[in-house]
Image (cartoon, rainbow, N blue to C red):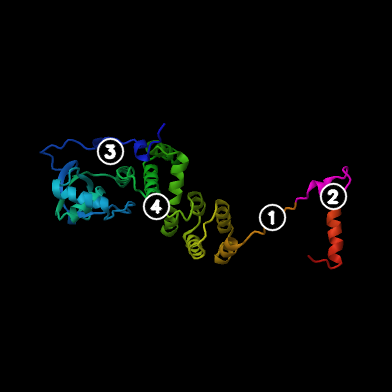
Amino acid sequence: MAKRNLGEKIKLTSYDDMFGLDTFSPGDQKLDGQIINIPLSELHTFKDHPFRVVDDEKMEETVESVKMHGVLVPGLARPRTEGGYEIIAGHRRRRASELAGKKEMPFIVKEYSDDEAIIIMVDSNIQREDILISEKAKAYSMKYEAMKHQGAGGGISLDAMSEQTGESKKTVQRYVYLARLTDELLGLVGAKKLGIKQGVEISVLPVEHQQVIYEVLSDLGVVIDVEQATRIKEAGKKGYLNEAYLRDMLTYVKPPVRKVVFNQKKLDSYFDPTTSNSDIEDLIVKLLDEWKEKGGQL
């Protein structure tokens, strides 16, 4: 069976269901649910928006589409108490409109609580194929906390997110933990210079410890394994984690394990077949000690 990509696994609701749109009556004075053209200058990025808006090749294609056809799918925004509108969905379309020379863009305007807005913002972006690990971690963490605020317990929230994304509960939880990392360490995870499991171990440490860890890892250019990450976490918990400890631990070279194997024929020429292996070993060590005492050298 062909493996489905993440976009196929995610269970998307309809546009109306996701945004909770209502039919707007012309006599209604509220903007709730209306599609209106909003000046770009009045649109503001969602607070702590975790997803990049990059001027790349895909953006160029979107810009050309906007120039030729306009914005075909409205964005979603909510009014701000201080004026203007906060974008919930449509940050890339807003940027494309700006690059296309447009002065305004169509948006569905609707009132949402902070938690509702966060969940919709994450759900409307998470199915993209080019999401970075850092973006996914922050997005999952934001949605997880929003769902908890709405009354769902931590376990229930993880179960729901697992079902919605098609990823295991454990995987979702790991991404939530990764969001606790500093941006620098999260960048190492994205660059595959710090494993996800290792990042999860370190994520429980305070920021000041994480900063030291990043500096040492960057300076030494090493990639730590899970065992080392666990030792670093324990050192932090027990109060002896510092730069010197990290450098000593990460530069320590284990001595090679020595293993000497004797040819059976050679042993038989010196020992009776009934002599046990332990007796043979004891005698060899005894003879070597005597040789050493006499100043023996190789």
Dominant secondary structure of the residues highlighted in magenta in the image: loop
Identify residue for label 2.
Answer: 280
Name the kind of residue labelled 2 in the image: Ile
Identify residue for label 3.
Answer: 18
Q: State the residue in front, 3 or 263.
A: 263
Q: State the residue in front, 110 or 188.
A: 188
Q: State the residue in front, 276 or 271.
A: 271
- Badge 2 or badge 3: first in the primary sequence: 3
Viewed as shown, does residue 157 lie left or right of 74? Answer: right
- Badge 3 or badge 4: first in the primary sequence: 3
Q: Quadrant of residue 48?
A: bottom left
Foreground mark, 3 or 1, reads 1
Cα distance in 3D space between marks 1 and 4: 40 Å
Marks 2/3 in contact by CB < 8 Å: the verdict is no
* Quarter of the picture holding the C terminus: bottom right
Q: Residues within 10 Å of mark 3 (few under 14, many from 20)?
A: few
Q: Please state the total of marks drawn on the protein image.
A: 4
Q: In this rendering, does residue 105 appear at all?
A: no
Cα distance in 3D space between marks 2 and 4: 59 Å
Reply yes or no: does residue 57 show up in magenta. Answer: no
Picture disc at residue 134: 4
- Badge 2 or badge 1: first in the primary sequence: 1
Cα distance in 3D space between marks 3 and 4: 24 Å
Identify residue for label 1.
Answer: 257
Cα distance in 3D space between marks 2 and 1: 21 Å
- Badge 2 or badge 4: first in the primary sequence: 4
Q: In this rendering, does residue 144 appear at all?
A: yes
Foreground mark, 3 or 4, reads 4
